[in-house]
Image: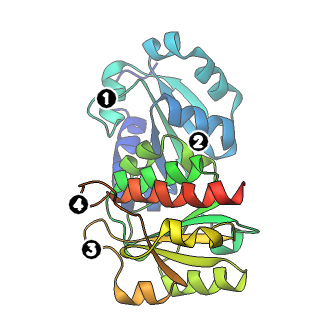
């Protein structure tokens, strides 16, 4: 039982809220029962530490059992210690530390459906796009430009464990990504408010496709759109001015998923 908030292990975990500390240590935070369970089920070899409270064990004993069967060091901690470690205001009784996810575009093979987030800054949006891509059966998500850090605690929470289900790559140069995917026969569709409507490009959606999504406020700039084979929009049938990034991404990804599985 770790009960001292000044314990060196507690301070080390708390520092992982900062990107520079994560990069230096080569690890990141995973909070909450669902995300920790997905880590332990789908990437147990990357689990380094798991900390849980007595109350959590009473409710989620199966997750503690998974932790104890993994290579991770497992410790029970007091409620105050968990609160000191957590990035959230109201932690849910469990925190894991995992090795950084380090994939490259060469790890993406035979992909049918990909989401590219270009200059997506909000961690909640990026994490939700990853979750939507996972749900739609996408093979990969690629973060390009100055997008949010994949290991940002808010992104990890918003993905609800989906970061452990599919290949996720951080690659700054969008042009590089497009070139590699094009060489593999993947078409690039830029999602934009101005463009062909999704129903009008339905005949093309069954082909291997990478959907390109832009910044929440500015969308995609001209240079990014010019890299795409088509610019495609989500039609607005009601009175809403627009859709937010994560919702639009979900529609685009599922439009492809429906056609690819028809």
Q: Of residues 221 and 82, which is closer to you in this image?
A: 221
Q: Is there a contact, CB below 8 Å, between mark 2 and mark 3? A: no
Q: Residues within 10 Å of mark 3 (few under 14, many from 20)?
A: few
Disc 4 target residue: 241
Residue 171 coordinates in the image, percent (x, y): 52, 75
Direction top: furthest residue: 58
Residue 218 has which mark?
3
Q: Earlier in the sequence, mark 1 or mark 3?
A: 1
Local secondary structure at mark 2: strand
Circle 2 residues within 10 Å: few <14, some 14–19, many ≥20: some
x and y percentages locating residue 45 in the rendered image: 69, 44
Q: CA distance from mark 2 to mark 3?
A: 38 Å
Count of labels shown? Answer: 4
Compute the Cα span from label 1 to label 2: 19 Å
Look at the numbered disc 3 and give the secondary structure of its residue: loop
User: Quick one: 53 or 164, which is closer to the camera?
Assistant: 164
Q: Earlier in the sequence, mark 2 or mark 4?
A: 2
Callout 1 secondary element: helix
Instruction: Tell us which disc is closer to us: 2 or 3.
Output: 3
Residue at image location 51% in from the left, 50% down from the top: 132
Residue 91 occupies quadrant: top left
């Amino acid at each position: 039982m770790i009960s001292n908030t000044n314990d060196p292990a507690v301070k080390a975990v708390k520092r992982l809220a900062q990107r520079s500390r994560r990069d230096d240590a080569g690890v990141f935070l995973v909070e909450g029962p669902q995300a920790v369970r997905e880590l332990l089920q789908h990437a147990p070899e990357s689990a380094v530490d798991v900390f849980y409270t007595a109350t959590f064990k009473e409710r989620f004993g199966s997750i503690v059992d998974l932790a104890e069967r993994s290579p991770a060091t497992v410790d029970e901690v007091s409620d105050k210690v968990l609160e000191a470690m957590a990035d959230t205001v109201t932690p849910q009784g469990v925190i894991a530390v995992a090795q950084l996810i380090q994939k490259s575009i060469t790890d993406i093979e035979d992909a049918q459906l990909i989401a590219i987030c270009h200059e997506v800054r909000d961690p909640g949006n990026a994490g939700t796009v990853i979750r939507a891509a996972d749900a739609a059966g996408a093979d990969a998500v690629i973060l390009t430009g100055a997008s949010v850090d994949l290991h940002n605690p808010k992104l990890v929470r918003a993905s609800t464990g989906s970061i452990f289900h599919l290949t996720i790559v951080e690659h700054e140069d969008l042009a590089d990504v497009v070139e590699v995917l094009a060489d593999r026969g993947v078409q690039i569709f830029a999602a934009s408010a101005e463009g062909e409507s999704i129903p009008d490009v339905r005949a093309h959606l069954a082909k291997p496709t990478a959907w390109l999504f832009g910044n929440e406020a500015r969308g995609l700039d001209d240079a990014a759109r010019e890299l795409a084979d088509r610019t495609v929009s989500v039609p607005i049938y009601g009175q809403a001015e627009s859709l937010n990034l994560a919702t639009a991404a979900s529609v685009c990804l599922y439009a492809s998923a429906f056609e690819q599985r028809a």
